[in-house]
């Protein structure tokens, strides 16, 4: 099994110790409940020179695992904040995460721009 390219990505390869959320210590990290802990890391990380059809199929299988995960949102936010450059995290591929990050940056820029009507109202007042 190939090793993930980034040390923090090893979460997916750790054997699961499933603890119901109501019994889990609130200080425990989110990834202790990740469904992917029971699956092969290879499902979430591409082998080198993987053919496109195989990659798409593997990514869809990984996304199906993510879809049933109780901590999918936390996982996705982790991958966006790090940012994780490889693998499927929180149901998103690396390319999809780049799109989300670009949209967030554009939104942040737009929110920081002063609106033109505010300037006109102040000048007219």
Image: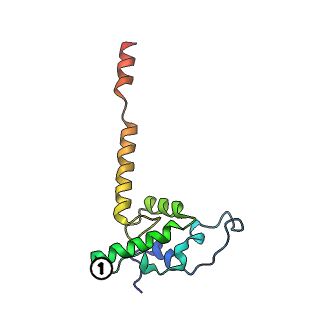
Vertically, is 59 above or below 108? below
- Of 15 and 57, which appears nearest the observer? 57
SS label for mark 1: loop
**Outermost residue to the right:** 23
Locate the C terminus by quadrant.
top left
Q: Residue at x 45, y 65 (%)?
A: 91
Which residue was labeled with disc 1? Answer: 50
Quadrant of the rendered structure where residue 57 is? bottom left
Q: Residue at x 49, y 72 (%)?
A: 65
Quadrant of the rendered structure where residue 2 is? bottom left
Locate the N terminus by quadrant.
bottom left
Q: Residue at x 35, y 59 (%)?
A: 98
x and y percent of residue 71 in the render? 56, 64
Q: Residue at x 34, y 56 (%)?
A: 99
Dot 1: within a 10 Å radius of its alpha carbon, few (fewer than 14), some, or many (20 or more) residues?
few
Q: Specify whether 11 is left or right of 98.
A: right
Quadrant of the rendered structure where residue 53 is? bottom left
**Outermost residue to the top:** 125
How many numbered discs? 1
- Of 93 and 4, which appears nearest the observer? 93
Q: Specify whether 14 is left or right of 28.
A: left
Q: Specify whether 104 is left or right of 51.
A: right
Q: Specify whether 35 is left or right of 43.
A: right
**Outermost residue to the bottom:** 1
Looking at the picture, the colour scheme in use is rainbow
x and y percent of residue 94 in the render? 36, 65
x and y percent of residue 44 in the render? 42, 74
């Amino acid at each position: 099994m190939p090793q993930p390219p980034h040390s923090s990505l090893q979460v997916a390869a750790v054997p699961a110790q499933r603890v119901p959320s109501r019994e889990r210590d609130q200080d425990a990290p989110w990834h202790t409940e990740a469904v992917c802990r029971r699956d092969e890391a290879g499902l979430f990380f591409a082998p080198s020179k993987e053919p496109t059809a195989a990659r798409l199929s593997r990514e869809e299988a990984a996304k199906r695992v993510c879809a049933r995960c109780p901590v999918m949102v936390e996982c996705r936010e982790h991958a966006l904040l790090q940012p994780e450059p490889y693998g499927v995290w929180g149901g998103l591929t690396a390319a999809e995460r780049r799109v989300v990050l670009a949209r967030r940056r554009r939104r942040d820029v737009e929110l920081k721009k002063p609106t033109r009507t505010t300037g006109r109202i102040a000048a007219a007042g």
